[in-house]
Image: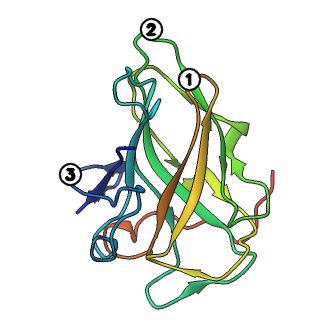
């Protein structure tokens, strides 16, 4: 498994843009202890087999955490951020249809029930000052820097599970809107 994790990401007002180098992972795809202090979002493609042409590319995938020095308590909600690009060679659009984690027991709120991914156009999981993907019902206390499994699913490209970082709501991530404390239609 090859996964690229970005470092030194910057946030533009219109969304996340990657200006990054990469850090290596241990053989199991987990970052080493030293790398954990530098890693932010995860980069990957689907299918994960790099010998195959990508259907979807995901850049800077992360879960936005609490402000520095604070924790998310059980039952908290958390926003998921990334830039997603449909890069299927046939030019057919895909759709983000699910985001789940065993660390959250509530339903994930995806704006519109799914997010259309027009061919070869970056789609930011942030629009109009609010996150487009919110996981609800955290099962245990977490803090910025912790890692959680996340399964992300697409209509055409399928799904994959990856370990992502809960990024502290500060620095280049301070202007990202946090998840609402309550969710609804």
Q: Nearer the viewer, residue 51 or 168?
A: 51
Q: Nearer the viewer, residue 73 or 42?
A: 42
In-image side of 133 versus 121 (left or right): right
Query: Which numbered tag is attached to residue 19?
Result: 3
Instruction: Pick whichever of labels 2 and 3 is earlier in the sequence.
Output: 3
At horizontal 70% and vertical 61% (from top left) the residue drawn is: 102
Q: Secondary structure at mark 1?
A: strand
Q: Residue furthest bottom?
A: 69
Q: Work out how far the residue at label 2 is from the one at label 3, CA to CA, in angstroms.
A: 28 Å
Q: Residues within 10 Å of mark 3 (few under 14, many from 20)?
A: few
**CA distance for labels 3 and 1:** 25 Å
As displayed, is residue 76 above or below residue 56?
below
Horizontal and vertical percent for residue 1?
40, 44
The residue that appears at 65% across and 83% down in the rendered structure is 141
Are there few (<14), some (14-19), or many (20+) residues within 10 Å of tag 1?
many
Quarter occupied by residue 134: bottom right
Contact? badges 3 and 1 (CB < 8 Å): no
Residue 11 screen position, x and y as percent? 31, 58
Above/below status of 5 relative to 49: below
Mark earlier in primary sequence (3, 1): 3
**Residues marked 2 and 1 touching at CB (< 8 Å):** no
Side (left or right) of 60 relative to 148:
left
* Cα distance between the residues tagged 2 and 1: 11 Å
> Where residue 101 sits: x, y (%)?
66, 58
Residue denoted by label 2: 90
- The label shown at residue 94 is 1
Residue 170's disc is none
Local crowd size for mark 2, using a 10 Å CA cut-off: few (<14), some (14–19), many (≥20): few
The residue lying toward the viewer, choosing from 7 and 81, is: 7
- At horizontal 41% and vertical 62% (from top left) the residue drawn is 30
């Amino acid at each position: 498994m090859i996964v690229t994790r970005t470092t030194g990401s910057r946030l533009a007002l219109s969304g996340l843009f990657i200006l990054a180098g990469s850090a290596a992972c241990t053989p199991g795809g987990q970052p080493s202890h030293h790398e954990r202090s530098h890693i932010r979002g995860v980069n990957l493609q689907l299918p994960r087999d790099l010998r195959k042409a990508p259907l979807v590319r995901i850049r800077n995938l992360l879960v936005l955490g609490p402000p520095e020095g604070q924790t998310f308590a059980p039952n908290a909600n958390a926003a998921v951020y990334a830039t997603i690009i449909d890069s299927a060679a046939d030019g057919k659009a895909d759709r983000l249809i699910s985001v789940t984690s065993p660390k959250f027991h509530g339903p994930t709120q995806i704006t519109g029930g799914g997010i259309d991914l027009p061919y070869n156009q970056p789609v930011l999981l942030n629009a109009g000052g609010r996150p487009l993907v919110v996981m609800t019902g955290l099962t245990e206390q977490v803090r910025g820097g912790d890692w959680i499994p996340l399964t992300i699913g697409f209509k055409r490209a399928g799904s994959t599970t990856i370990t992502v970082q809960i990024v502290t709501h500060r620095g280049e991530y301070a202007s990202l809107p946090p998840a609402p404390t309550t969710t609804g239609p």
